[in-house]
Image (cartoon, rainbow, N blue to C red):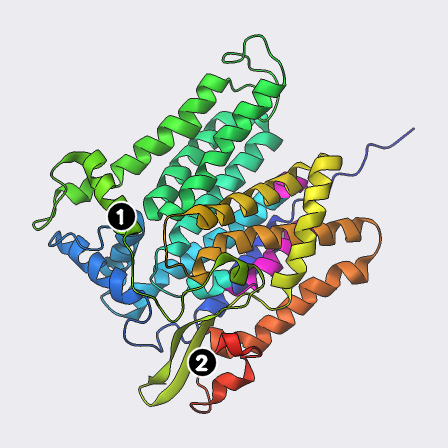
Amino acid sequence: MSRAPQQTRDPLGWSAAITLAFWLLCLPFLTAVTKPYFDEVHYLPAARELLALGEFTNREHPLVGKELIAAGIWLFGDNPWGWRLIPTLFGALALFANMRAMWFGTTSRFATIAYGVLLASGFHLFVHARIAMLDIFYLAFLSVAAWQFAAAMRQPEQGRWRLAIMGVALGLAMGSKWNAVVVAMLPGLVFLVARFTAGRRRLLLSRRGAPVPGITLVEAALWLGAVPVLVYAATFAPGFWFKINPITEGLVFHHRFMLDLQEQVLSPHPYQSTWPEWVINWRAIWYLYEPVDGIQRGIILIGNPLTMLLGLPALLWCLWAALLRRNHAALGAVLVYVSSLGFWIFAAKAVQFYYHYTLPSMALLAALALACDALWQKGRRKLALAPVIGSVLVFAWFYPILSAAPLEGPNSFAVWTWLASWR
C-alpha cells in the first residue's frame, strides 16, 4: 500500500520568530537620536499639523504615512517613541507578510525562511523601520498585498476575501507614497493577461483558469481596480478639513498640484544618485552622522554589500527559471524588480536618491532566496546556506552604523565605509 506524499509543513512559527527577532533588533537606540533626523524634519511637522488640522503642509505626498506617524504621536507622545515605534511595527509587518507571500508562492520552507533572514539582514528594511519616513508604510502595505495575492492563487476557495483585503492594501500603499503605484498595477495586469492568453470565449465572465479560479475578470477588476482607487481617494479625507491650505477644488486638481510639486526641478544634492549606482550598491546616504548629546552616532543607508551583489546573478537565474521553467515565483520577483526600478529610470524627477531602491532591493533578495532554494533542493545545501549566513554576519558587523549605536569618535565611519563613495 503506497503512502500519500508527505506535505511540507508551513513554517509559520519560524516566520513569527524571525519577525519578532527583527522587531527586537529595531528597538535598541531607537530613541537615542532625540531630535528629528534626515527626512523626519519634513514628515513630523506635517504629522503634527495633521493632528491639529492646522496647516496642510508637505502637500506633494499622499496622507496615509503621515496619518500613521500622527497616530504614533497621539498614542505615545510627541517624542522619539511616538515618532518611531509605529514604523518599527510596520517594518515587522512587511517582513512577516513577505515571508507569507514566499510561502504561498513556493510552499518551500527553505525559501521562506531564507527570504526572511535575507530581508531582515538586508539593511534597507531595518533602516526604514526605525525612522519616521513614508517608505516603510507603502512597503508594508504592498507586502500585505503580495501575501494575499499569493495566498489567493494557492487557495482559490479563499480568493474572494483575500482579493478584497489585497485591494484595500493596494489603496493604502498608494496612499502612503506614489512609489507604490506601478507595482500596485501588476496584479490586475497579471489577472488580465492570464485570462486573455487562456483563450476563454467568455473573457469577462469566465470563472475558470489562473490566476485565481472562481473569480471572473469583472470581479477581479472590482477588487484590484475599483477598491484600491476608492480606498486611495478616501485617505485624502482629512485634506478637506485643514484650517490653512485645505483641498478646495477637488481631488483631481489637487493631484495635478501634487504632480507639479513632484516634478519641480530641485537643486543638486550631495547625496543624489542614479539607478546604475543603486544596482551596484555604489552610493550610500548618511541619514545621520554627528554627536548626539555628546556621543558620536551614525546611520548609513546602503544595501548589504554581500547580498546586493549576489542578488544580481540570482535575478538572471529567476528570469531563466520564469521563461523556461514557468516558475511563477521567479517571474514575480523579476516583475517587481523591473517595474519598481523602471519607474525611477523613466520618472520625471531630476534628483533621485538611493532609498528609492528599497522596493527593488526587496525583490532582489526574493530572487536570491529562490536561487538558494534551487541549490537546496538539488542537495547543495552548504552553498545554499552560505549567502544566508553571510548576510547575517555582514549585518552584525554593520549593526552599529545602522542603528545609531555609540561610536568611538568622529572618524569611526572609516570602519564601515569600504568604498570612497560610501563616505
Mark yes or no: residue 144 visible.
yes
Mark 1, secondary structure of its residue: loop
Which residues are the magenta region?
103-123
Q: Position of residue 385 (x, y in %)?
A: 74, 61
User: Which amino acid, by three-letter code, is at mark 2?
Assistant: Ala
Q: Which residue is labeled 1 in the image? A: 63
The answer to whether residue 109 of the structure is visible from this angle is no
Q: Is residue 234 left or right of residue 356?
A: left
Position of 282 with respect to 142 (left or right) is: right
In terms of depth relative to the viewer, which is nearer, 221 or 151? 221
- Most extreme residue toward the left, as rendered? 243
Near-viewer residue (170 or 61): 61
Residue bearing mark 2? 405
Q: Residue at x 51, y 29 (%)?
A: 189
**Which one is closest to the eye, mark 1 or mark 2?**
1
Which residue extends farthest top? 201
Decide whether the magenta segment is chiefly helix, strand or loop: helix
The type of residue carrying mark 1 is: Leu
> Could you classify mark 1 by the number of other residues whose Cα lies within 10 Å: few (under 14), some (14-19), or many (20 or more)?
many
Question: Is 122 one of the magenta-colored residues?
Answer: yes
SS category of the residue bearing label 2: loop
Up/down of 392 relative to 328, above or below: below
Q: Please report the residue visible at 33 percent of the width from the left and 84 percent of the height from the top.
A: 292
Which picture quadrant has residue 83? bottom left
* 1 or 2: tag closer to the N-terminus: 1
| Image location (x, y in percent) of residue 131 | 37, 65
Alpha carbon distance from label 1 to label 2: 31 Å
Which quarter of the rendered picture does the N terminus lie within?
top right
